[in-house]
């Protein structure tokens, strides 16, 4: 069997690159943290949709006039038609109505307002539940892969998905993209996709392993390289189709799922990368060591 | 080789039948979908239930009583299909999608509305809201000064007559949620069980109180933990935008699959259309509330369904390249790809089932959508795709037409 790209030979570089990206993310997490959305910090968030591009200074002045000096606002939306206004203290329903009325007077009758007020307890619970979900899902996936494949595949796959989760979270910290409840769902999907990718490659490795029964490290890495190559077209095509979906969501999906789509896009690339360059490479090293041990055993018994 | 027309007829019947069923019922399915409040406007509040009195315990029974009372209140303002769900030990999530006047709804929801008629000292409770005839409270006018009042009626007219008889000439203060509404002096014994509650009401306030009394009081105090209100126009905007995103995504995916996989690609498109339809059908049959994250998962699910097709077609191409005939390649390709697809899907099911168990609202909607998508993709991308492809292969129409599978002649090695 032939292959064009020697992934196994480059694995030290992959490990180096992976560790470096994770370190960068972790450093950023510790220094600047995450840009937490309204779901995780107390207060209110108003999305004021002005329906057309507008003067932010004028809008800020309006809010100051209504009793919110130096308002924490940003402009969002495809046509810059949205004003996102955050406060640390909850805004009462009456106040929301006042703001809506005032904006309608100045910016046209079509102004619409989304209001969200959250107790941070709920957000923290959600984050905690998400971490539990990932851990419990990991255990379930390990159990399933061990049952259907072997434990080395299982743990290599888990390291790969943890990489994807950490990488995505790290990137969100570096670029200070907003993290909300849907982000959690995005990370969980990424985990699901990545495991999908990894299984497809592992399935091929298992199949080729039966056929070849490699005795040397060259033969073993040959099996891995060939398996990756055989599934590469599928990996690329699948990532491409899902990217079509994610990009469409990003461009046309509107403000509320913007960061969700970004997270998915990042995670998709990371998932494809980690399946080929992390999961498979960890496995090949581990498997080789186990094969050597097995060979030593009968010799020492003699 | 002779072309078997029978198989082609069956194949065509499948295609025409599927398209006819889908075309004929899509409108019904779409009309039956329940849209979440983020897609059609409305508001959602998460309450924490706290004891009304010291020592009272919050049990699942009190929570469900509270939910019932809230349901009645919401019905009184004419909102259809309120969604009230118990979360955790002491929380209630109330979603009112499509509500026209969220302010009114919000006012109605949170109040315990415990009505008490007390003795002149204001300490001892003589009669309670639960002693009233259900549904009899209404907004009225005081015949003496035309002030808006709420007229009520007691179930036990005799008890009321005795109490009013006992306290003639004295005051009988009326309290709502521990706040004194009014402090009327009883003029005479009232025999017919009817009473009037005044309290400097406006007509609207009086109506609101009448509605509250008719719906009954809440057995607990509700503290608002979070709320989320979406203007109806914004909800529609999100719906349109995400539908557009879906259409573009599907269009690109179709073009790509057909361009790359040719004939199997066309079959994949057929199975993807069935997939999109079936997922929506399951949503409407299972009463899944479609939310924005749900739509995102739906669009992504199409990506997953394509993946199953891609895995299978790549396998078939591999077999073709190794020099096997088309019928054998299709058979062994779909067989060997099945376990791969199965394993990959099961792991995704594990992930989304865990997500469903631990998630709330948004995340839950997402995971339900994903779960439905995975099950349906088994049906369409594996079963349907195989049935259609096998029918075509058995018809001998594809004999030696490797290019229809996107395999070039020079790629095929001699066996």
Image (cartoon, coloured by chain):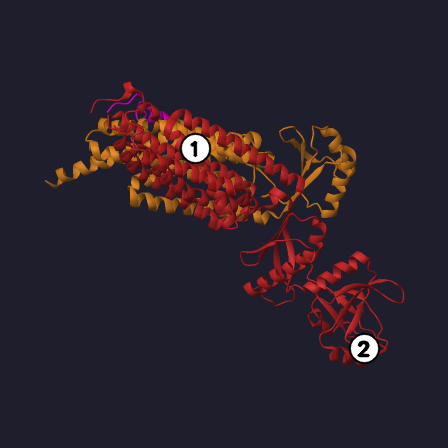
Chain colours: A orange, B red
Q: Is residue B290 above or below residue A11?
A: below
Which residue does the image show at 65% across and 39% down from the upper left? B234
Q: Quadrant of residue B219?
A: bottom right
Magenta-colored span: A1-14
Q: Main secondary structure of the magenta part?
A: loop
Mark 2 closeness class: few <14, some 14–19, many ≥20 residues within 10 Å: some
| Residue identifier under label 1 | B269
SS at circle 1: helix
CB-based contact (under 8 Å), mark 1 and mark 2: no
Q: Nearer the viewer, residue B355 or A91?
A: B355
Quarter of the picture containing the C terminus of chain A is top left
Real-space CA distance between mark 1 and mark 2, rounded to the nearest whole angstrom: 77 Å
Q: Nearer the viewer, residue A33 or A43?
A: A43
| Residue identifier under label 2 | B190
Q: Is B308 left, or right, of A86 in this rendering?
A: left
**Is residue A60 a member of the stretch shown in magenta?**
no
Inspect this view and state whether residue B49 appears: yes
To which chain does the residue with label 2 belong?
Answer: B
Q: Is B291 left, or right, of A215 in this rendering?
A: right
């Amino acid at each position: 069997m032939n292959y064009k790209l020697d992934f196994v030979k480059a694995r030290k570089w992959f490990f180096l690159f992976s560790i470096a990206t994770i370190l960068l993310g972790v450093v950023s997490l510790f220094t600047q943290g995450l840009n937490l959305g309204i779901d995780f910090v107390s207060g209110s968030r108003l999305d004021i949709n002005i329906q057309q591009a507008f003067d932010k200074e004028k809008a800020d002045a309006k809010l100051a006039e209504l009793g919110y000096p130096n308002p924490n606002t940003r402009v969002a939306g495809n046509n810059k038609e949205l004003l996102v206004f955050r406060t640390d203290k909850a805004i009462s329903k009456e106040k929301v109505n006042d703001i809506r009325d005032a904006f309608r007077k100045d910016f046209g009758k079509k102004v619409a307002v989304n209001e969200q007020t959250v107790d941070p307890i709920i957000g923290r619970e959600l984050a905690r539940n998400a971490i539990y979900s990932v851990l419990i899902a990991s255990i379930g996936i390990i159990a399933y892969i061990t049952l259907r494949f072997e434990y080395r595949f299982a743990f290599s796959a888990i390291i790969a998905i943890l990489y994807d989760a950490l990488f995505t979270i790290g990137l969100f910290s570096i670029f200070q993209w907003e993290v909300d409840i849907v982000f959690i769902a995005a990370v969980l999907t990424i985990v699901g996709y990545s495991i999908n990718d990894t299984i497809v490659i592992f399935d091929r490795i298992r199949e080729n392993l039966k056929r070849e029964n490699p005795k040397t490290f060259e033969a073993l890495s040959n099996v891995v390289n060939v398996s990756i190559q055989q599934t590469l077209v599928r990996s690329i095509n699948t990532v491409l189709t899902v990217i079509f979906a994610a990009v469409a969501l990003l461009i046309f999906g509107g403000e509320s799922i913007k960061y969700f789509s970004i997270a998915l896009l990042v995670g998709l690339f990371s998932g494809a990368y980690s399946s080929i360059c992390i999961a498979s490479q960890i496995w090949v090293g581990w498997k080789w060591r186990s094969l050597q041990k097995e060979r030593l055993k009968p010799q020492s018994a003699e | 080789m002779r072309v078997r027309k029978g198989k082609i007829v069956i194949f065509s019947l499948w295609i025409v039948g599927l398209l006819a069923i889908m075309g004929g019922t899509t409108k019904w399915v779409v009309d039956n979908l329940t849209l979440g409040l983020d897609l059609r406007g409305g508001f959602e509040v998460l309450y924490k239930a706290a004891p009304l009195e010291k020592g009272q315990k919050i049990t699942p029974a009190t929570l469900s009583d509270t939910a019932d009372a809230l349901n009645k209140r919401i019905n009184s303002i004419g909102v259809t299909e309120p969604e009230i769900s118990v979360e955790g030990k002491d929380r209630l999530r109330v979603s009112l999608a499509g509500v026209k006047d969220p302010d009114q709804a919000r006012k109605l929801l949170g109040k315990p509305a415990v009505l008490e008629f007390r003795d002149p000292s204001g300490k001892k409770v003589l009669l309670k809201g639960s002693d009233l005839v259900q549904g009899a409270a209404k907004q009225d006018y005081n015949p003496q000064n035309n002030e808006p009042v709420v007229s009520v009626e007691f179930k036990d007219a005799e008890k009321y007559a005795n109490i009013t008889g006992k306290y003639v000439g004295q005051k009988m203060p009326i309290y709502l949620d521990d706040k004194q509404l009014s402090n009327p002096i009883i003029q005479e014994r009232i025999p017919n069980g009817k009473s009037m509650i005044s309290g400097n009401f406006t007509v609207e306030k009086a109506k609101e109180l009448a509605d509250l009394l008719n719906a009954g009081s809440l057995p607990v105090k509700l503290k608002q933990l979070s709320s989320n209100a979406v203007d109806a126009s914004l909800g529609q905007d999100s719906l349109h935008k995400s539908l557009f995103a879906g259409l573009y995504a599907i269009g690109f995916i179709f073009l790509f699959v057909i361009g790359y996989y040719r004939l199997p690609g066309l079959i994949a498109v057929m199975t993807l259309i069935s997939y999109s339809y079936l997922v929506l059908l399951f949503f409407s049959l299972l009463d899944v509330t479609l939310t924005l994250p749900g739509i995102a998962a739906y669009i992504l699910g199409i990506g997953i369904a394509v993946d199953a097709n891609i895995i299978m077609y790549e396998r078939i191409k591999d077999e073709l390249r190794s020099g096997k005939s088309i019928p054998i390649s299709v058979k062994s390709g779909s067989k060997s790809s099945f376990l791969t697809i199965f394993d990959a899907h099961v792991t995704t099911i594990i992930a989304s089932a865990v997500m469903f168990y631990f998630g709330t609202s948004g995340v839950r909607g997402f995971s339900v959508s994903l779960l439905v998508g995975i099950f349906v993709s088994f049906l369409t991308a594996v079963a349907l795709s195989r049935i259609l492809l096998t029918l075509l292969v058995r018809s001998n129409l594809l004999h030696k037409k490797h290019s229809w599978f996107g395999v070039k002649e020079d790629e095929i090695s001699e066996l």
